[in-house]
Image (tube, coloured by chain):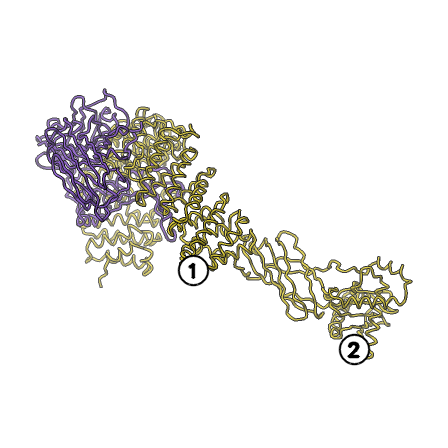
Amino acid sequence: MALRDDCFHQQHSPALELHVEGPGGGVLWPMLAISQGPLILACLPLVDAPAESRPPLASLFSVSQGLTLLAGLQAFLLGSKGKPDSEGLASRLAMMPFILLQVCPLGTPLDIPQPGASTAPAVPTPAGTQKQPAWKTGLHRGRAVVNVALTEMVRSMQYGNQSRQDLWDVYGTVTCKCEVEGVLPNVTVTLTLPPNGSPLLDVQVHPCVSSLDASILTATSVEDCDSSAFSGPYKFPFSPPLEPFRLCSYTSQVPVPPILGTYQLKEEDNQLCLTVSLKLHESVKNGFEYCEAHLPFFNRNQMGNVNVKVTSGQLDVSKEKNLLVWVIGQKFPKSREVSLEGAVGFSGQLPGPTDPLCTDLTAYIKLHFRVPDMTLSGCCVDQHSVQVYSSAKPRIVTSRELLSSEYYIWNSTGTAPLSSGHMML
Amino acid sequence: MSVNWPERISAFSRSPSQFLCSTTAEIFLTEILRELRDDRANDLIKVLLLSPLLEHPTLLCPSVSVGEETALELMSVFAQCSPKSLQLRCHLLLALTSVLLCSSCVTSCTSASQDFLDVLFQMTQDTNDLQAGAAVRPLRSTACDCLRELEACHPGLLSQRLELLSNLRQQENSRLHQAYTGLHALALRNAVYLLTQQKGAGAEDLKAALGSSEGFVWARGADSEFHSDMALLSPLTLGPMGRVPTLQTGPDSKELRSLISSLLEESYLLTSLSQAALLQKLVEIVSMVPAVSPTIFRAQLLRLLGTCEVCLLHSTLLMKAAFTDSLFSAEDEAYLLKRLVSLSQHPLLSTPEKLFYMDCILHFPENRPISCGDENLPVLLTPRLAAALVPTLFNDSASMLARFNLLSLVYLEEGEEDRDGQGGRGLAYLYDHLTSLLHVMENQGSREMVVTFFRASFLFLLHFCHVKCYSEDLIQRLCDMYLRQTRLAPHLINLADRIQDRLVESGWALALLRALQRSITEAPLSQLTLQDFRWHLRILARVAEEGEVPQRATLSFLLSVITSNSSVLCVSGDWRLGNGLLGVCRRLLLHPSLDSLLTPLADLLQYLTCYYGDTDIQDHARLYYTLLTTLSREKLAGVMAQGGPERGRQAKVHSLSTIMTETEELTTGLTVHQTEEPVLRLVKLDSPEPDAPEPDSKSHNEANSESNSSPRRGLEERESYRAKLQSPGFVSEITLQYHLTHTGVYDPHFDKLFSIRLHFGLTDSNYEEVSDISVPCLFRTRKPPAVKLRLKPKQPYPTTLRASAVFTTEDGLSWHSSLADLHVTFPEVFLPLPGPLGWTREQKNGVFEEIWSEISSVASKGDLDNGATSLFCDQLDNWAVDKLVRNFQRYRISDCSELDKGGCKVLFFLPPQSHVLLRVLTVEENVQVHIATDNWKLLPYINSYLEDITKDLHTAQVNSDG
C-alpha cells in the first residue's frame, strides 16, 4: 500500500511503473495502460536506452505507437459503442493472438485491427495498376453511397452567480461512411458556417484527409480568436477507407447556451425548497427528441414526501436514488420557459447516495437533450457540397444533431466548484 | 495417448520456469517438434504449438546447435505443409525467425539461417502475386516482416540489396507495399548509418550502396564489434542536444533525395503507425546526410499538424526536435505549442493521450531552448495560454495532477518574485484548488481522492514551500484535518518524509510534525477514541524520530492516556496497540534528548511492564526498560539503530509492526556471538617490570654503611616480619604480565576490537577467583596493550587458567572468544622477600638467617609438620654455577662471592605465607643446594624446578663444549 500510494509517485504521466516480484524482478517502465470496464489493456514500449536512464516520454518514438495501438485494440475489443456484450468480447478476446500477429508481427506495431476484422483473411483484391492504401481492406463494388453525419455536443456550467461566470462550449465531429468504387477515390466534404458564425477551432482530421489548407488549422480554443479569422468554407478532400470513420472534429465557442437555467435551493424545516427555471434560447429549434432535467440529491437520507410542481412536462421520482427526473418532453411551451417549484423532505430511514463534491447546498441539475437536425455553431454539411469524383453518381445523405454533454446548472445558493481556469483571468 | 496441448501450452505460457520443472526444455521441444510433424494434428493445434517457440525461443533453444536443429526441423515442416495451411506457414516463418535470431544462428551465419534467408527473399520477390497468386499474400507479407526483423537485429544484413528492395517496393501495388516500404526504409537507414561510420565514405559510396543488388552482408553480421554499436539498434538521439553522425556527400545526393521524396509521397497510403515509423526512419536518414535539406518534409507538414492520430503528431514533434528552425518557423512553433495545449484538454481525446500531450509540453522541442533539464516549460507557454490547463475538481486524478504540476511550473516565477508575500493570482488559484481538494477529500473521499490530494500537496510544496503564507496555512489545515480524519496518518507521515527527502534544507516537514505533535497532545483526552489513539501513535513515533523536536509532550501524553484509561487500554492488552506504544518508546530510546526523558520514559516502560495485558508487550517493555537503565547511550544507540537511520526509516514506514522486525535486529545487537576460533591470545612478557625493589647496588651501599648495626638486629627484623606476615593485606598477590594480541587467524572483521573484557577461570582450588580485566581497544595495526594478571594463591602451586574474552567489533556487535589456556609455572609464583622498602641487605640477611635456623631447628626436632630441609646436588662447572645463581638474581640475599663460604643465600617468598630458602655452595666440583622451606609440600616442585634449570645448564654446557 505504501508503495502504491506514495505521494512521491508522479501518476500524472501516462507511463506507469510495474514492479515485478520474485528473483530477477525489477521495474518495468514505461508501461502504458488503458482501462475501461472490465478490461485493462497494457503494453510495454521498447526503450532503446540504458536501463538506468529514463529519457522523457516525449522523446520516445515507441510511446505514441503504443498509445495508438492500445486505443486501436480497445476500439476493436469493445466495439464502437464502448460497451460490449460479454459474448462478443469473449470471442474477440479469443481472436487476439491472431489479431496481434497481424497488426503487430514480432512486436512491431504496423496497424490497428479493423472493428469487423476476423481471423480468416478476406479474399484479397487482386493487385491493380494503382497502389492500394494499406488502410483499405478491400474494394467496394456496387451503388455509391456517401453518408456524412455531423454531431455537436454542448457542455455548460451555469452558476447563476455574479462572481462565477457561466461557461459553455461546443465540440463537433463529422462521421462519414463512404461506399465508393475505386482503389483511391476522391471525395471532398465541405463544412460551412452561417454568416457571422464563430470559426471552427482546434480542427483535427483523419489521416485519410489528403491535404489541408493552413487557414483551417490556425484557430485554436486556447487563445482569443479575432473576428477577421477564417470562417469557412472548410474543405476536406480525402480518399475514404471502407469502414465508417471520423473525418474531422472541431470545437466552437458559441455566444449563448441553448438552455439557460437557474436553480435555487433553500433549507427550510428539514426539507429543501426548490426553484428551477429553464429558458430555451430563441435561436434554438424547439423540437427535441428528448429533453430531461435530472436533479440528484446527495449525502442525505432517502426522500420522504416530495411536493413539487412543474409548469410543463412530468416529474418522475426515484426515492431510492434520491433523484428527480423532470421529463420536459419534445417541446418547450410557446413562452420557451418552464419552471419547477416545490419542496422535498428527506425523512427516509436509509441513507441515500453520497458524493464528495455535493455537500450541504452544493447541488446541480444535469440536462440531457437531443435536438435533431440542428447545430449550435450553425455548422452544416450541404448535400450538394459533397463532391465524389467517380463514374457513378452517388447517393449522398447528410444529417446533423445537437447533443448535451456535461450540461450542469448549479444551485446558486450553494458553493459550486470551479470548472475552468479562464474564470480567474 | 492424446495430449491436451492447449492446456499444456497455456501452462507453459503462464509460467515457463515452473512448467519446465516438471519436464526439461529438451523433452518439451522434442514433443512439440514431433507433434508438428504429425499429419493427423490440425493446423490450429500446430499454430498453438509454435507459440512457445515464438515467445520463449531462448528457453527452448539455448544454444546455436539446438537452434540450428530446431530450425531445420521447422523448415522441413514448412516445406511439407499443404499450400492451404496459410496460417500455419505464416507462423512457421515467424517461429523460424525467432529461433534463428535468439539462438544466435544468424550471428554465426549457420547454413539453416542462410537457407531461411533465401527462402524469405524468394517469397518477397513475387510482387503483385504474379506467381503464387493473391491467396498466399499473407505469407509474402510475413516474409517481409521476418526480413525486417532480421535486418533490425542484424543491421546491414540487407545493405547490399537496396536497389532490389527499392524496386520491389515500387512494383508492389497491393496493400503489401506497406511491408516493402517498412523493409526498404529500415535497410536504407541502417546502410546510411554504416556509411557514416566508414572513414572517408562519401557521395560515391552512397550511390553505390543505393544501387547495390548483391548478396547478404554476412561477414559484417558475424563481426562482434559491429553489434556492440548500440546506435544501430536504437533511434539516434536527435535534437539540439543529441549528436548525430553525418555522412559528407557534398551537394550531390540526388538519388537519395528522390528516394526519400518517393517514400514520402506514398506515405499517405500507409497506416498511421507505419507512416509514423517511416517518418522516423526518414528523419534519421536526413539528419545523417546534410546534403538533403529537411525542407523535403515540408509538403507533409500541414497534413501532420492537423492529424488526430497521436503517433503522427508525435512524429512531427520528433521531427521538430531533429530539425528545429531549419524546418519549423517561429509561427509553426507557436502553433504547435497551442495545438498541444488545446489537445491536452480536448474533450474527444482519451486520458492517456491527454497526459502524453502534457508530457510533450513539458519536453517541448523548442527551436531555441534556453535551458536543458528534466522538465522545462517552453518560453512561449504564457500563463494566459496555460490557463486552459488549470486543474479543476472535474478532472480525473491523473489529469488533475498533470495539470497541477504543469501550472506549478508556470506560476513558479510568481512564487519567486514574491517570496514573503501573497504570491500571484495563479498561485492563489492553485492553493485554492488544493484546499478544495482537501475539502472534497474530507467529505467521504475515496482512497483515490486521498492519494490525489497528498500528491497535489507534495507538488505544491515542492514548488512553493518557500511561500510562507501558504505553506504555514497548509500545516494548520492538515493538522485540523488530521484530528477529524486520523486514518490519514500514514499519508501525513509519507508527505513529511518525502518533503524532507526532497527539500533537505526546508523545515516544512519538521514544522508539520511539530504541529501534529502539538495537536495530538493538546487535544482534550476525553474525546480520544481507541482508533484515534492508534493513529496518534503512528504520528508520534514519526515525530520521535526527529532529534530537534522536544519529546516531553509526547511522553506526558502517553503517560496520561495509559494511566488514566488503564482499565481500558492496559487491561485489554491489545497487542497491536502495545506494539504502537513500544514503537514510540523505541524511537525515544534513540532520541538525542534521552537524558532528559529518562524518568518519564522509564516510568512509561515500567508501567507497561507491570500492567499491560499482553505478555509479549510486557516482555518487550521490560527489555526496553532494561536497555534504557543498563546500557550506555552509545551501546543503546548501536543496538536500537542497527542498519543505519535510512534503512531503518524505510522499514518502519512500510512495516505494520514496530517491534516484530526490530526484535531480530535487537537480538543481533544484544546477542553475544561466538567466534569460531580464538582470535586473541596472551603472550607472556619476558622481562617483567620490577614490582618489588630488587636488591640493587644502592641497597648494597646502604648495607655497607650500616654494617655496624647490632647483631641482635636479625631477630628484631624477623619478629617484625613475622608480625607483618600475619597481618591481613600483606603482599599476597603475584602479578604476571602479558601482551594481548591477535592470533594468526586473519579476519578483517576483527581488526579493530573495543571494550575487551578478559575473563579467567580456575581449574583448581589453589587460587582465589581472578577478577576480569578490561582493555579499552585492540587494533591490529597498533602496539599490543599490556595486561597485568594478578593472582592470589591460596596454595603456591603451579596452575592452569581458562581464559576467554568478550569484545565489541566496529559494527557494534558483541563477541565471545575463548583463548588458549594460560599456564602458571612454579617459578612464576616466586616473589622476593617482601620486607619493607628501606631494608638493607644486612637486615634481609638477618631475616634469612632467622628463618633458616628456625626451620632447621624445628626440622631436626621433627615436631613442626610443615617445615622441611633438603639437599640438591649436581656436578656443574664454574660457568654453569654462575649461570645457576644468576637465575636466582631477583631473590638473592647475598653475593655469588659467598658460594664457597657460607653459600649464596636465596629466598623465594611464595604468597600467601610460604618461604623457600636456598643456600648454594660449591664443594669441590659439585654444587650443593641446601633447601629449607616452611611448607614441605613444595619440596617436589622445588626439586623439579632445580632439575629443570640444571638440565638446561647441562644442555647449554654440552652445546658450548661441542
Which residue has dot 1 on it?
Answer: B613
Q: Which mark is residue B864?
A: 2
Give the camera-side residue of A276 and B503: A276
Neighbor class of circle 2 (other Cα within 10 Å; few <14, some 14-19, many 20+) is few
In the displayed image of the protein, which residue is found farthest to the front? A269
Where disc 2 sits, the SS reads loop
Nearer to us in this view, B620 or B752: B620
Q: Which chain does the numbered disc 1 sit on?
A: B
The numbered mark, 1 or 2, whose residue comes first in the sequence reads: 1
Q: Quick check: A10 above or below B846?
A: above
Question: Residue A243, percent across and down?
Answer: 16, 38
- In front: A329, or B353? A329
Quadrant for residue B498, please give it: top left
- Chain A colour is purple
Q: Chain coloured yellow: which letter?
A: B
Q: Nearer the viewer, mark 1 or mark 2?
A: 1
Q: Is residue A261 visible?
A: yes
